[in-house]
Image (cartoon, rainbow, N blue to C red):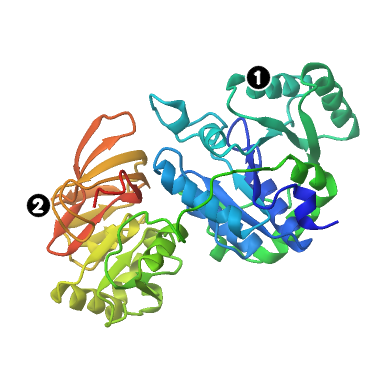
Amino acid sequence: MTARRLSGVPGSGLIIAAPSSGAGKTLITLGLLRHLRETGIDVISAKTGPDYIDPAFHTAATNRPCRNLDPWAMREETLAELAGDMAAKADDIICEGVMGLFDGAVHSDDRHDGSTAALAEITGWPVVLVIDASKQAASAAVLAKGFAEHRPGVDVAGVIFNRVGGARHVEILKEAMKKIAPDLEIFGALPRNDALELPSRHLGLVQAREHRNLETFLDKAADWVGEHLDIAALRRAMRPWPVRPKSDAPLLIPPLGQKIAIARDDAFAFAYPALLEGWRAAGSELSFFSPLTNEAPDPKADAIYLPGGYPELHAGRISANWDFMDGLQQAADASKPIFGECGGYMVLGQGLTDADGRRHPMAGLLPLETSFATRRLHIGYRRITLAKAGPLGGARTRFRGHEFHFATVIEEGPGLPLFRAEDASGRELGETGLADRRVVGSFIHLIDLERADAV
């Protein structure tokens, strides 16, 4: 039987979700992705919401780029382009949810609240709920029933029980499901596996590129999932999304130039693949360089992008890499656009103090001083408006994005602000970011334009 017939319709998808964070949906998603790939199935993945780290693990599992799908920050036409393009390129689409199934941003319309449930409503993909059963039995069935019935537009196809204690525990769970939630399928029960743990740090999991023996880890996760889950039943539950793309790739953020040099290494890893694909589709040439190895941006480039990442973990090396720093200075002197996002923004500043209290001089292109000696969490969706025309577009161009960092701002300015910002509920956050000639940056990761004609 072919892979396509097993899943019903090519380009069909499902969403791996959970009642809360920590249930094990990332590990199960990775194991499922690698298992499908290793059994010859053409699979591609997605991640709900703003996330850079989990998608990098997805990419390692499938050897294909993972797409972020964000029902709060993305226009519906952007979602249609991205998901439709995925459906055209693969047999199976596995989308990992974010936090708990119904957790999202404040929004008057549930369909755009940023939750996994909102994405399920938009795409029509069924939800498979991962339930941590380690400290419950029949109660897990009640939980499953409540989640399945809470939002009529969300199709919960069934459950995966994780961290089960043994055969008797599984039997109790099945009996409870048959009595309490008979319409929900049980796709499998996974025993606790302490050998399959992913290390983490302050922004989430340690990056996939830093994970030693990642291939071995993924293979073991695939074997674990393949042994305990009904893969054929999961594939039969998949459903197609009928919307198909109108063009080759969506344009999320306008290109910075015709030839864009992009920092890429362990310190600068947080760039959305769909953004780069959009720039290529718009005709831009992309080149990559590593500040950590003292590479300068291509001097032929007419724009530079410093994405987010973990520069605070490598501040000493970055500060000492004069070829990189000199390349930035030369580009600024030539009035080439330079855009720094979150970690990239900090590197464009005057100095960065690490967690041990040591200050490291940075590029000095913006009047910004940041510190990790005292950390403070900044997190949330942002609706932002350009304060003046520049590399990102005309004045009053509106974007949607996300902020997630622990840096403390010691000084920001004096200087021209880059954005005026609001949170997801519309509360004014004031001015944020900095702009000095063609050098611009902020802590906000841009995700999409608010309107296609807003440039």
Q: Position of residue 159 (x, y in %)?
A: 73, 33
Question: In the rendered image, is residue 260 in sight?
Answer: yes
Q: Nearer the viewer, residue 439 or 152?
A: 152
- Residue occupied by mark 1: 146
Distance Cα–Cα, label 2 vs label 1: 53 Å
Q: Position of residue 161 (x, y in %)?
A: 75, 34
Closer to the chain start, of discs 2 and 1, is 1
Residue at 39% from the left image edge and 27% from the top image edge: 106
Q: Residues within 10 Å of mark 2 (few under 14, many from 20)?
A: few
Q: Is residue 186 left or right of residue 168?
A: left
Residue at 84% from the left image edge and 21% from the top image edge: 178
Q: Secondary structure at mark 1?
A: helix
Q: Secondary structure at mark 2?
A: loop
Q: Amino acid at mark 1?
A: Gly
| Quarter residue 214 falls in | bottom right
- Residue occupied by mark 2: 414
Q: Residues within 10 Å of mark 1 (few under 14, many from 20)?
A: few
| Above or below, 347 relative to 127 | below
Q: Is residue 350 left or right of residue 50?
A: left
Q: Which mark's residue is nearer the viewer, 2 or 1?
A: 1
Q: Nearer the viewer, residue 364 or 439?
A: 439
For the N terminus, the quadrant is bottom right
